[in-house]
Image: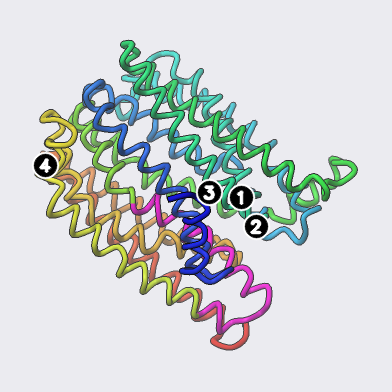
């Protein structure tokens, strides 16, 4: 079927400018990117050992933590800038911050290596050197992505996402077959970050060229940075705590059970997270755009309806993958990825409830940015991190096995997301009326 026919079918099935249509377009591109990565994994798991995957998963754990705030969340300010001219100033601020944060990430990773905290000493000595360019490429990609969302450049976003996955997969397999080992896996991350960044940055620059200000003075940049200061002052620290709770499980697994177990957990989490990365991110982006529009138009009834309709739909949509993983993963994993990955199947079933809760609640959390209520997220961040730490200490003291520990952290994370959902519902009910904004 040609791309023209596919587009015609989409146009007929989904009304123009509908929420579902926008989610479908974003999720479709993400799905294609995910398919590339998933199709490559049975080859990757036969080229690399669980220990090698575990080592690169340690790097990706730190990457996931640091990358979440590379722009100190100024990329989200791009979506609510008052006009395109101001968005140029926000974009420039975000790019400067990304460059600084990318440099800062290198010595921090080196300190983790030197101290061997949570087994980070397993990383190759040169890992901090390649981390800087990876951070820079990914950070600029995320800034360009938010700018592209503002412009409605959905097709360009999906193309960049596909290019990132393809570059990563091709590099992993190609260098892996040549005996590249852990180095090949890290170079693959660099290739993916650089390819996606270059592709999307060019598209956004072309789109916004006409609205570019005549000059970027220090005073104007400082003024716009102060205007949206809630993002770095409140949302970024909250994101650090959130990312810490999200990324700590893998280093915890490595420290308790070794690099091989970290590899099992890394593969399991990647696969169970597919609905979250494929659908959750697209839903979150569109939800943020639609809720922001309703708030700007002071249409409280629509804003209230958008939130609660999405809450119910995500809870229903996530049930099928949740049950499929619990039932099928334990016997399907070794067949698809090889016998040495059998433990990853049980790991996937153990963490499935955690990722189900994340699929429901994470997209709705964008309401905090839209309503400039980022400080409320600290309630979830502190509770989630406390529960996770408690699970780790109990596992360490009681000598829990690998799967038992994963069940414990899954329960801790589900509890944290329930608390988060209650906080978000209270915010919507109090801040947004059913007819007008309070």
Residue 283 falls within the magenta-colored stretch? yes
| Label 3 SS | helix
Dominant SS in magenta? helix
Magenta residues (range): 275-304
Residue holding disc 1: 146
Q: Is residue 275 left or right of residue 253?
A: right
Image quadrant in which the C terminus is located: bottom right
Residue drawn at (31%, 19%), measured in percent from left and top? 122
In the image, 216 versus 306, the foreground residue is 306
Q: Is residue 407 left or right of residue 217?
A: left
Q: Are marks 1 and 2 in contact (CB under 8 Å)?
A: yes
What is the spatial separation of the Cα atoms under label 4 and label 3, in whole angstroms? 32 Å
Residue 400 numbered tag: 4
Residue holding disc 2: 79
Q: Residue furthest top?
A: 178
Q: Earlier in the sequence, mark 2 or mark 3?
A: 2
């Amino acid at each position: 079927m040609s791309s023209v026919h596919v587009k015609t079918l989409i146009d007929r099935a989904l009304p123009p400018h509908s929420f579902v249509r926008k989610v479908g377009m974003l999720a479709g591109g993400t799905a294609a990117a995910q398919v590339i990565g998933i199709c490559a994994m049975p080859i990757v798991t036969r080229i690399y050992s669980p220990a090698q995957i575990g080592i690169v998963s340690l790097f990706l754990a730190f990457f996931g933590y640091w990358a979440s705030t590379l722009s100190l969340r100024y990329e989200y300010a791009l979506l609510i800038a008052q006009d395109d001219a101001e968005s140029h100033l926000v974009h420039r601020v975000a790019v400067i911050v990304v460059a600084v944060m990318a440099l800062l990430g290198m010595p921090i990773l080196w300190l983790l290596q030197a101290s061997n905290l949570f087994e980070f000493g397993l990383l190759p000595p040169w890992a901090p050197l390649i981390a800087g360019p990876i951070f820079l490429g990914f950070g600029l990609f995320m800034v360009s992505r938010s700018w592209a969302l503002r412009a409605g450049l959905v097709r360009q976003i999906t193309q960049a996402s596909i290019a990132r996955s393809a570059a990563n997969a091709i590099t992993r397999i190609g260098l892996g077959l040549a005996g590249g080992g852990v180095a090949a896996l890290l170079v693959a991350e660099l290739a993916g970050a650089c390819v996606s960044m270059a592709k999307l940055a060019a598209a956004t620059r072309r789109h916004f060229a006409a609205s570019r200000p005549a000059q970027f003075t220090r005073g104007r940049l400082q003024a716009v940075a102060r205007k949206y200061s809630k993002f770095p002052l409140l949302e970024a620290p909250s994101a650090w705590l959130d990312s810490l709770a999200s990324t700590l499980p893998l280093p915890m697994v490595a420290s308790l059970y070794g690099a091989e177990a970290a590899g099992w957990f890394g593969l399991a989490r990647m696969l169970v997270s597919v609905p979250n990365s494929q659908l959750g991110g697209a839903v979150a982006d569109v939800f943020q755009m639609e809720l922001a529009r309703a708030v700007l138009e002071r249409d409280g009834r629509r804003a209230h309806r958008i939130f609660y309709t999405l809450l119910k739909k995500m809870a229903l949509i996530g049930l099928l993958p949740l049950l499929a993983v619990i039932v099928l993963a334990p016997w399907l994993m070794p067949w698809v990825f090889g016998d040495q990955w059998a433990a990853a199947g049980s790991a996937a079933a153990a963490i499935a409830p955690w990722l189900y809760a994340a699929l429901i609640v994470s997209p709705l959390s964008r309401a905090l940015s839209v309503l400039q209520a980022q400080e409320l997220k600290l309630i979830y961040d502190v509770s989630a991190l406390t529960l996770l730490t408690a699970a780790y200490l109990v596992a360490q003291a009681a000598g829990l096995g690998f799967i038992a520990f994963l069940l414990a952290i899954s329960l801790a994370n589900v509890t944290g997301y329930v608390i988060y959902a209650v906080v978000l519902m209270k915010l919507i009910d109090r801040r947004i009326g059913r007819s007008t904004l309070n």
